[in-house]
Image: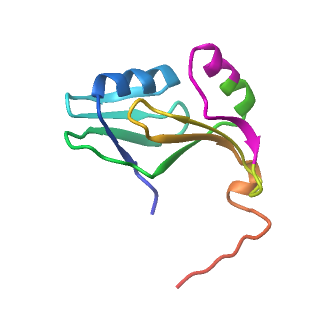
Amino acid sequence: MELNQITLPVKNMDDAVNFYLKLGFTQIVDTPHYSRFSCPEGNSTFSLSLESDEFENSSVIYFEHEKLDELCADLSQRGFQFEQLPTEQRYLWKEAILKDPSGNKIKLYWAGENRLNPPWKVEKHI
């Protein structure tokens, strides 16, 4: 299996679409209640769904970028506000944190070899 996509809830579609376009994603579906984006690299996609009810999303979406420090510096210069600038984590990833206009948490990160092969890796199958 391969992960196809993730859908994030949003409060205001226009604000959300502009945020993700500004981050560098390409919009491939555009409706008043649903938008879908492709990532600049690879085949991954994600979408936004307009929610009329109040919601709290505790999920986190991760976008990997090898030149994380450069990416975050560029985004900061373009007006993005980070909750955390790139920081080395105890699990051997470097992460920066920001939120979209609807409060969805986004982690921009670089894990390198540790993403799929951390020192504590196990392989269990049924």
Indicate left or right for 61 with 8 as reference: right
Residue 80 at least partly seen: yes
Q: Residue 32: where, in percent of width, then height? A: 19, 28
In which image quadrant can residue 109 be found? top right
In which image quadrant can residue 37 be found? top left
Q: How is this picture coloured?
A: rainbow
Which residue lies at the image location 66% right of the left edge and 18% below the top edge? Answer: 74
Which residue lies at the image location 21% right of the left edge and 29% below the top edge? Answer: 31
Which residue lies at the image location 47% right of the left edge and 27% below the top edge? Answer: 25
Q: Residue 14: where, in percent of width, then height? A: 30, 22
Residue 43 at least partly seen: no
Indicate left or right for 48 with 38 as reference: left
Residue farthest to the top, as pictured = 78
Which residue lies at the image location 61% right of the left edge and 21% below the top edge? Answer: 75
Indicate whether 67 appears above or below 55: above
- Report if residue 13 lies within the magenta region: no
> Which quarter of the figure is the N terminus placed in?
bottom left
Indicate whether 87 appears above or below 59: above
Task: Judge by depth and name the residue closer to the eye, 11 or 110.
Answer: 11
Indicate whether 11 appears above or below 73: below
Magenta stretch: give its range: 73-88
In which image quadrant can residue 62 be found? top right
Q: Residue 80: where, in percent of width, then height? A: 56, 22
